[in-house]
Each structure stands twice: as C-alpha cells, then as structure tokens.
Image (spheres, rainbow, N blue to C red):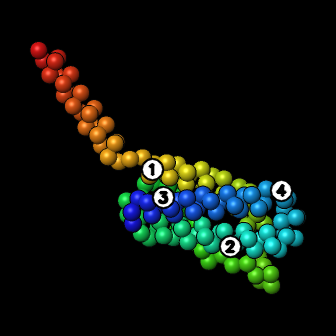
Amino acid sequence: MTREEQQLHLNNIIKGIEEVQELAQDLNYQQFTEEEQVKEEIYTNLQMIGQAAFELANDADDMPDLNFDTDILSGFRNARYNVEAEVDNQQLWNVITEDLTLIREQAMEASAELARDPEVEDDLHEGNELRESQLKEKQKH
C-alpha cells in the first residue's frame, strides 16, 4: 500500500468520525434512540470507518503506530442498522460520545506522521550526522 493510500484511509476514518459527531452533536441519548434516520446514517459512517481501518490493518506493514487498535475499528465495517434487531443503543451512544474524539485525534496524529516527507527527514538526519562529524573533527585539532 502506498503512503497516499494509507493517507486516504486515515482521512476516511477522520471524515467518518466527524460526520458521526456532527449527526449526534445536538442530540441527547433519548433523542438519539428516537431518531431512526440519524442512527441509520451513523451506522453507514461506522461501516466506512471500519472498512478504512480494515484496509489499513491488512495492507499496511509500514504504517506508523496509529495509537489505537485498527482491528477493533475494523469490526465497524460489519455494523448494520436494523430496527427490528436493534440492540443496546447505550453502547453505540457511549462510543459516539466517549471514544470517537480520542480515536479521531489519534488518526489525525498518524496522518500527520504519515504526511511528513521521509526524504526530507532523511536529509535532515544525514545533515545532523555530517555536522556532528565536522564538530568532532574540529575538536581534535
């Protein structure tokens, strides 16, 4: 997987989280349980987040540490909203209100890490080594 593809998946995770948070921002738990359309849209976004995390987990050997378990997020790709089979809304509400902000921050950190140009960092590292060796040479004289 290329760095661009990794960045795309991270951006999809971030965008999906932002959309979920926007959908739920003006709701309390009771309103959330009553808003079928909102829940359906949230599940759709969770599926997208899960698919992006799944791609990262399975295709990115050189991915920087994301500081969160992509395997757990990958499980969201199987999220399905079904009114008849609706389970505990409280669990989903807790994820939305307590976990997604932290996960978004961690994905943004990983995105920033990935966005750093490795060639520039290598050049800086080589430049530092050269300066250190020059200083040592001067100290010898």
Q: Amino acid at mark 1?
A: Ala
The span from disc 4 to disc 1 (Cα, nearest Å) is: 33 Å
Q: Amino acid at mark 2?
A: Thr
Front-most of 102 and 111? 111
- The crowding category of the residue bearing disc 2, from other C-alpha atoms within 10 Å (few below 14, some 14 to 19, many at least 20), is many
Q: Which mark is residue 44?
A: 2
Residue found 58% across the figure and 61% down from its top:
13
The image quadrant where one finds the N terminus is: bottom left
**Residue 94 x %, y %:** 74, 61
Dot 4 and dot 1 residues touching (CB under 8 Å): no
Dot 1 and dot 3 residues touching (CB under 8 Å): yes
The answer to which of marks 1 and 3 sits earlier in the sequence is: 3
List the residue tagged with mark 4: 26
List the residue tagged with mark 1: 115
SS state under label 1:
helix
SS state under label 3:
helix
Front-most of 99 and 1? 1
The answer to which of marks 4 and 2 sits earlier in the sequence is: 4
Specify whether 45 is left or right of 129.
right
Q: Nearer the viewer, mark 4 or mark 3?
A: 3
**Residue 20 x %, y %:** 71, 62
The answer to which of marks 2 and 1 sits earlier in the sequence is: 2
Quadrant of res 80: bottom right
Q: Is residue 76 above or below residue 123?
A: below
Can I make out residue 74 in this image? no
Specify whether 124 is left or right of 72.
left
List the residue tagged with mark 3: 7
**Residue 65 x %, y %:** 45, 54
Specify whether 139 is left or right of 38.
left
The span from disc 2 to disc 3 (Cα, nearest Å) is: 21 Å
